[in-house]
Image (tube, rainbow, N blue to C red):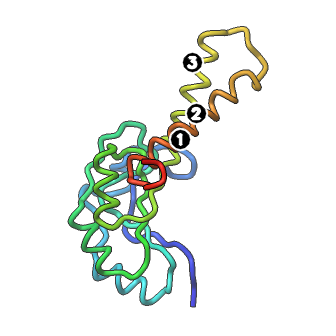
Amino acid sequence: MRRGRRDQGRVGGERHGRQHRVEQHVAAGVRTDPAEARQFVRDTGVDALAVAVGSSHAMTTRTAALDHELIRELAAAVPVPLVLHGSSGVPDEELARAVDAGMRKINVGTALNVAYTRSVRQFLDADTAVVDPRKYLAGARTAMAHEVSRLLRTIGTPSLQ
């Protein structure tokens, strides 16, 4: 039996390390079908399933609207945790609702990259003569850690409330 995480449906956005417009990779409204997801999980034995429910990879603006009813249907249809790709483009209240509806793994890599890069840019803009990365990378790591903590509180992690 093959194990691991698989994607079901298509999530638009980044491809081969370059960001593209979503329209180039996914038709508007494409979503994971619960019956197909159930069969896919049954056939493959995956441990988790990434589903298409309205988000898009590598978004730097938080404007995605998720299909929460579909998330509930998918959670009821499959016996494995659901994975949300493109969560960095999802507003906080939408993320919290997605977790309430059954989403269990929330990918936020772009949000962490944005926090890290913003910190580096602010430091370098304030001191254009600095050349020692130790002076600005510590702040960038701290900015990323703060974003992780904020996101964990957003999705309802009890120990951080």
At which x and y percent is residue 71?
28, 67
- Residue at (34%, 57%) from the top-left corner? 26
- Front in this rendered view, residue 35 or 21: 35
Contact (Cβ within 8 Å) of mark 2 with mark 3: no
**Which numbered disc flags the more N-terminal residue, 2 or 3?**
2
Q: CA distance from mark 2 to mark 3?
A: 10 Å
Please tell me whether mark 3 sits on a helix, a strand or a loop. Answer: helix
Contact (Cβ within 8 Å) of mark 1 with mark 3: no
- Residue at (46%, 62%) from the top-left corner? 105
Residue pointed to by mark 3:
122
At which x and y percent is residue 144?
57, 37
Amino acid type at image mark 1 = Leu
At which x and y percent is residue 46?
50, 80
Q: Give the number of the disc on residue 116.
A: 2
Amino acid type at image mark 2 = Tyr
In the rendered image, the vertical position of residue 111 relative to residue 32, given as above or below: above
